[in-house]
Amino acid sequence: MVQKVQTVSNFLINAFIPGSQNHQAILNIIFVIALFAFLLAITNRFWLALIINNVVFIIFGIADNLKIVYRDESILPSDLSQLSSPTELVSFIGMTPVQLFLILLAIIFIIIFIYFAFRYFDSRIKFTKWYIRIILLIFSILIFISAGNLYTPGTVPYKIATKLSDNPVPWDVNEDQRNNGAVYSFMRFFDNKVMTTPKGYSRAAIEKLDEKYTKIADKINKTRKSYINKQTVIYVLSESFSDPTRVPGSHVTPDPMPNIRKIKNETTSGLMLSSGYGGRNC
């Protein structure tokens, strides 16, 4: 526990030290503030927005920790689809629908209690003027929209994140979270663009290529003696198999997989990027 507290403290302190190479905490704080600004703009109640904002991130932290414990993987945006089946979701951690309902009810009562407790010391109802709320709403929406470009080179969000020491590790979500913080790492994976659009890419360009290689194929097929539909094709796509010689900094001798390398050189082969492995499934 002491080590975890020290790690978090260093993560936050280094973010605001001039000349530091670790400003990722600021990226996390930006999204935390954006949600607070959104809630504030919608409700116009400072204490209510603050309490809900904190509750959301407390729940996120607990859920993230549970998923790491049980699945060895941090929470991803794709996991939000599970919220459409809450009863099935809670069954993964041994909870009944009744228990879930009681917990949600308790959270609602706690929020109401804390809200009125703060209201007792601060009787102001509305927080600010309508035009300030519009500014807050636009700010928060722009921040959330920016998540779609956090991993796209050349975009403004990408450049800002890079300036703030973003160190993306998209192939290992747990390591990405440790390097850049849980909230920011989660938001980054809303950017699901596989690659940057190549220069000159268009439907017309692809149709032109299709036409070109169709003519080449027709020419080859005139003298072809063997056809794919008369052959057995073995396609292997395995994340459990890896080439140890590709590990950075390692030197393996002799070649541990000469036969496989020979087969790869003689036929169609390639590499697969896996952002996680195992998943603790049998």
Image (cartoon, helix red, strand yellow):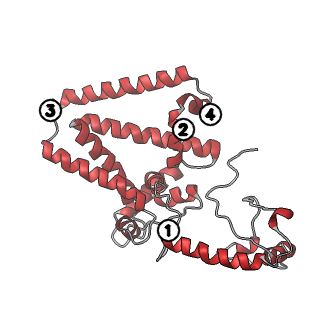
Report whether 118 appears left or right of 82.
Answer: left
Residue wearing tag 2: 82
Q: Which mark is residue 136?
A: none
Disc 2 packing (10 Å; few <14; some 14–19; many ≥20): few
The tag earlier along the polypeptide, 3 or 1, is 3
Image marks 3 and 4: residues in contact by CB distance under 8 Å: no
In the rendered image of this protein, does residue 95 appear above or below residue 164? Answer: above
Instruction: Count the labels in the image.
Output: 4
Badge 3 amino acid = Arg
Query: Of the residues shown, which amino acid type is indicated by label 4?
Result: Phe
* Residue 105 image offset from top left, x and y in percent: 42, 22
Residues at badges 2 and 4 in contact (C-beta under 8 Å)? no
Tell me whether the residue at label 3 lies in contact with that at label 2, contact meaning CB atoms closer than 8 angstroms: no
| Residue placed under numbered mark 4 in the picture | 92
Question: Percent from the top left, x then y, of residue 255?
Answer: 83, 77
Q: Read off the residue under disc 3.
A: 124
Seen at 15% across and 29% down, the residue is 123
